[in-house]
Amino acid sequence: MNTLTIIITVVYVLLAIGLITIVMLQEGKSAGLGSITGGSSESYWGKNKGFSLEGQLERITKIGAGLFIVLALVLNILIK
């Protein structure tokens, strides 16, 4: 393996560990008892979710998943 492949592999593994951690930090999407009483996401917190910690974690997860896929493809090309 050349140096570039080793560096990308290390970044890939660190990204995988980071994605696992970020996904585990996120709250569940189930509505729970809030759906029984008719709670909606149109409240103040629902409208401003992108600025909350949960919104930031979702955005980081999307970016990390995209990088994960791109690095997987790059590693596949480099190893063959």
Image: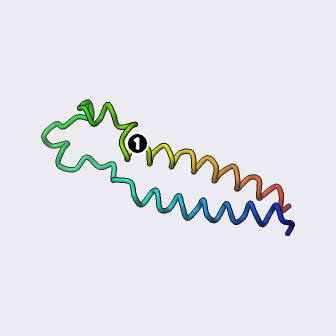
Q: Quadrant of the C terminus?
A: bottom right
Q: Residue at x 18, y 37 (%)?
A: 39
Q: How is the image coloured?
A: rainbow
Residue 80 to residue 41: above or below: below
Residue 38 place in picture, x, y as percent: 16, 36
Q: Nearer the viewer, residue 23 or 45?
A: 45
Q: Quadrant of the N terminus?
A: bottom right
Residue 15 place in picture, x, y as percent: 60, 59
Residue 2 place in picture, x, y as percent: 86, 66
Q: Which amino acid does label 1 sit on?
A: Gly
Q: Which residue is drawn at 58% across and 61% down?
A: 16
Q: Nearer the viewer, residue 32 or 11?
A: 11
Q: Which residue is drawn at 64% across and 49% down?
A: 67
| Label 1: which secondary element | helix
Q: Residue at x 26, y 30 (%)?
A: 42
Residue 48 to residue 52: above or below: above
The residue sitting at the bottom extreme is 1
The residue sitting at the left extreme is 37
**Few, some or many C-alpha atoms within 10 Å of disc 1 (few <14, some 14-19, many ≥20)?**
some
Q: In which quarter of the image is residue 17?
A: bottom right
Q: From the viewer's perspective, is 79 left or right of 15?
A: right
Q: From the viewer's perspective, is 58 left or right of 73?
A: left
Which residue position holds label 1?
55
Residue 20 place in picture, x, y as percent: 50, 62
Residue 79 to residue 42: above or below: below
